[in-house]
Image (cartoon, helix red, strand yellow):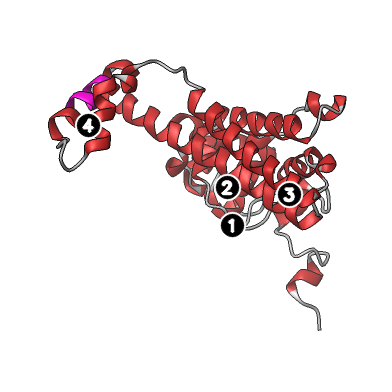
Amino acid sequence: MTGKNDAAGGTGLSPGIEAAWGLRDRPVKGPKPGLSVDRIVAAAVGVAASEGLGAVSMGRVAKELGASTMALYRYVSAKEELYLLMQEAAMGTPEPLPALESGAGWRAALGEWAWAQRRMFQRNLWALRIPIAGPPASPNSVAWWEQGLQALRGSGLSAGTRISVVLLVSGFVRNEATLMSDVAAAVEEKGVPAEEFMARWERTVRRLVDPVRHPELAGLLGTGVIGEPDGPDHEFEFGLARVLDGIEVFVRREAE
């Protein structure tokens, strides 16, 4: 008996992902001459970049391309697959890590890997809204995972533990990038500079905070540190350093 996966070459991957890996030929003929997976993905990314991921639909992308919606399904099986291919395009090939190439050590290499991921998300904030549907399966996502594992090559950690560390660091990066994206969106919606947005928030909180019920927050507001400019990367630098501190303690303990 032949199953669906057997008919697709036994990989269990969707047609679009198989095409991304070069495991199957992309259609050369279709309802719309010149239509291709690359053109469909590029159009979808353009919509997401200008209007957000929520604006992406098979119908909207078809309209951008001047094709029928049904024509797209010859190349991309569903919107979920389109999302994955869009994410693949956004991630791109991971940039080289100087610390990895120079042998500077796992901490420096892992830190560079985290910064590279953050830059990738900052260029494609819409990609943060793509639901995570499973482990890495597309070429670029697998390449990012490979690079993260390579960064930990000299740590002495087991293979399974290195996967956990990669998940921890990538989760931190994704969370921080999402938080900063949400804050930036809120500031943009208000139509005021970021400094004025924070000043308004601080004035509001000062009116609401009760020193008896919220003594720590009231004390913090009294110091004026909230209004001090720390730079756009301060929280990421601080958080990543603490995450790496914890991993370093763990690596040393495992070596004992």
Compared across the picture, whether 206 is left or right of 197 comes to left
Mark 3 vs mark 4: which is more N-terminal? 4
Q: Residues within 10 Å of mark 3 (few under 14, many from 20)?
A: few
- Residue kind at label 4, given as amino acid type: Ala
Residue at numbered disc 3: 253
Amino acid carrying mark 1 in the image:
Ala
Residue 26, visible in the rendered structure: no
Q: Nearer the viewer, mark 2 or mark 3?
A: 3
Q: Are marks 4 and 1 in contact (CB under 8 Å)?
A: no
Using the numbered discs, state the Cα–Cα distance from disc 3 to disc 1 in whole angstroms. 34 Å
The front one of 36 and 106 is 106
Label 4, label 1: how many angstroms apart (C-alpha)? 42 Å
Disc nearest the viewer among 3 and 4? 3
Q: Reply above or below: 213 against 226.
A: below
Q: Position of residue 233 (x, y in %)?
A: 52, 22
Residue 218 marker? 4
Tell me the amino acid under the disc marked 2.
Tyr
Mark 4: which secondary structure? helix
User: CA gap, disc 2 to disc 3?
Assistant: 41 Å
Looking at the image, which residue is at 48% across and 43% down? Answer: 56
